[in-house]
Amino acid sequence: MTMEAVLSGLAMALVALSSTVLAHPWKGYDTTVPAYPNIDFTTCASEYMMSAEFECVSLTVPIDHDKPRDGSIDLFVSRRKASGTSGSLGSLIFNNGGPGAGSSVVFQAISYGLLAFPAFSQEIFDSYDVIAIDTRGIGYSNPISCDKDIWNTAPEYLRRIMPVSQNSLTKDYELLRQALGEDVFNFVGFSYGTILGQTYAEIYPQKVGRMVLDAVVDRSVPGGISVIMAESLTYQATLEQFFLWCNKTEECSLKGKDLTAIFENLASATSFTCTLRGQRGLGQLLFVESFLQNWTELADGINLAVNGNAKGFSTKLKTSNTEPNGGSDYAARAIYCQDYGSSFVSAVDVKSVLDVASALLPLTRGASEAFTVAAYCAGWPAPVRNPAHTLNLEQAKKLPPLLLVNAFYDPETSSSWAQGAKEQIPSAVNIW
């Protein structure tokens, strides 16, 4: 998921946006959460491997907000205090998207320039106490674990997975706002984090402060072929941009070659040193493209694959039951399936979607994260907790200005989704 670097423009937007509106809760949600006492940050324990300038604390929340007496869990929260001499403008809560990767580890990497994106300007670090919370089931916050024995008894196990949908995460955020002693919720969210931001804005519009959503997902788009085709289209559009770049730069190891034909052959291939098979192979090939920091690496990876070595596109074997320091497929699956579910009932449904996609999008053929979600959520035994819906207009009218940032050629989050979200939030502003 491409996440735009929000530099000085983000800083100015966050400082300028205001939050003086009040609203009545939309009846579609239960907004009730218990009042939460303030929390005190302390030096981070060594087990969390946070650098000295970060502080840490645990936030205790109900396992199920609808049944607050049924037990609680602790969520890991880290903070980098404002470094400027003028004092802090308050807390700015960060979510890196995913889902699956803990925001605390990602934010620490961002702070030291270890990730190319997303980037924060020094003005942000000077002006805000930046907060990163590992949302439930992710990172250091009770990460969801899976092994072969659990997978073999998946239906029984999955019914018992704690609520990890956007509704639960949003209520966790509201408790965090209270615990921080903040009057408003300032938030920067990327990709999946934009869903959490929109959900919070819909449930608690009267608490929204400064909010920037980058790589926007439109939650009104239903699952199934609509979202699969939209995302596969952005994959193909971005891929075509890569082809154009490759044929006009000396840095591309494939310059001057028929890239369309090469890619089509790779997507159809079944025999490599590291095998790519069918739809999974194509999806993996495209998915890598969205995360590589530069297209030179992508070209080199394709060049190796042309010669029979697809090592650059292979899927890593799982070596542990949990993955607290990196993106976790375990957590991602649980979260996506509670949020989206699947329209696939049988293999006939899968084939039908792929037939349509292959006819209309011959390069990507329906390959997308949306297809992966639909495939592995088929038969998920737990109910969808927050189905796709248009944001409540009465709630949205009461929101302060929000900033929506998107690239035209973002392979994971279509620019059409950012426009769709804008149409549901009158105060929102798009930046391309």
Image (cartoon, rainbow, N blue to C red):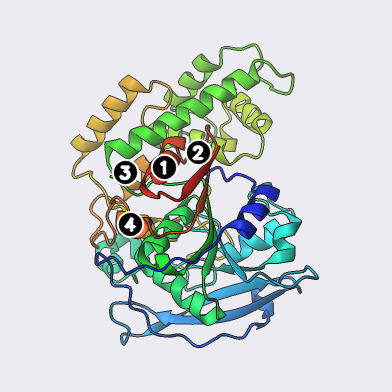
For the residues bearing labels 1 and 2, Cβ distance under 8 angstroms: yes
Mark found first going from the N terminus, 3 or 4: 3
In the drawing, what numbered circle is on residue 339?
Answer: 4
Mark found first going from the N terminus, 1 or 2: 2
Q: CA distance from mark 3 to mark 4?
A: 12 Å
Name the outermost residue toward the right.
85
Residue under pointer 2: 287
Three-letter amino acid code at disc 1?
Answer: Glu
Is residue 327 among what the camera can see?
yes
Three-letter amino acid code at disc 2?
Answer: Phe
In the drawing, what numbered circle is on residue 369?
Answer: 1
Mark found first going from the N terminus, 4 or 2: 2
Mark 4 or mark 2, which is nearer to you?
4
Three-letter amino acid code at disc 3?
Answer: Val
* Nearer the observer, 190 or 429: 429
In the image, is residue 252 above or below residue 431?
A: above
Which residue is rendered at x = 30% and y = 65% of the image?
158
Q: CA distance from mark 3 to mark 1?
A: 14 Å
* Nearer the observer, 425 or 324: 425
Three-letter amino acid code at disc 4?
Answer: Asp
Residue under pointer 3: 221
Question: x, y percentage for residue 37?
Answer: 50, 88
In the image, is residue 307 above or below residue 400?
A: above
* Nearer the observer, 197 or 321: 197
Mark 4 or mark 1, which is nearer to you?
4
Q: Is residue 246 left or right of residue 275?
A: right
Mark found first going from the N terminus, 3 or 2: 3
